[in-house]
Amino acid sequence: MSPIIFGRFDTVARAEDAARALYARGFSVWDVSVISVAQQGGQGGRQPCVVLAACVRRGNATVAADVLREAGAQDLERTQGQWESGRWTDFDPAVHGGRQDAAQPLAREAVDCESTGNEDPGSELEHYVDRQRASRD
């Protein structure tokens, strides 16, 4: 089990901004996971939620919490979980905000779609995020 700090954001763009702030503070792309989740909202509707999680094995929990708080994370929490290959593998949206069938780790999607295995994971993820942002703008 790995120590994890996570918070919820109302948009993917805000979570991505927070991820970039974590990278600037020494976190690697293998330490940060952005997960898009659909939550049940009022009147039976679904509303988007984005969870940004950071694996804090190196004693950097305070840094992660500060960065997420400054980036506007809601419901900042600390937990223990399975962290493998740059993602929170036992993330449970029912416990951490949303529905299980709606969770989609964005970083894994980027690697699965475009990786040859030889790229620098940071640049690969950055290109994917840039294309996602451009498609939403």
Image: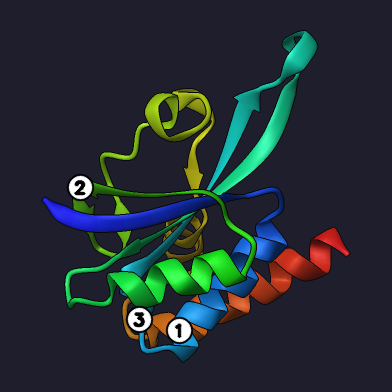
> Separation of disc 3 and disc 2 at Cα?
19 Å
Dot 3, how many residues are within 10 Å of its Cα: few (below 14), some (14-19), or many (20+)? some
Tell me: residue 127, above or below residue 65: below
Q: Circle 2 — which element?
A: strand
Instruction: From the image, tell me which residue sits under label 2.
Output: 80
> Which residue occupies 71% across, 71% down?
131
Image quarter of residue 54: bottom left
> Which residue occupies 54% across, 65% down?
69
Whichever of labels 1 and 3 marks the residue nearer the N terminus, that label is 1
Instruction: From the image, tell me which residue sits under label 3.
Output: 28
User: Residue 50 at what x, y percent from top left?
Assistant: 59, 48
> Which residue occupies 27% across, 46% down?
89
Mark 1 in CB contact with mark 3 (< 8 angstroms): yes
Instruction: From the image, tell me which residue sits under label 1.
Output: 23
| Disc 2 residue type (three-letter) | Gln
Which of these two is toward me, 58 or 131?
Answer: 58
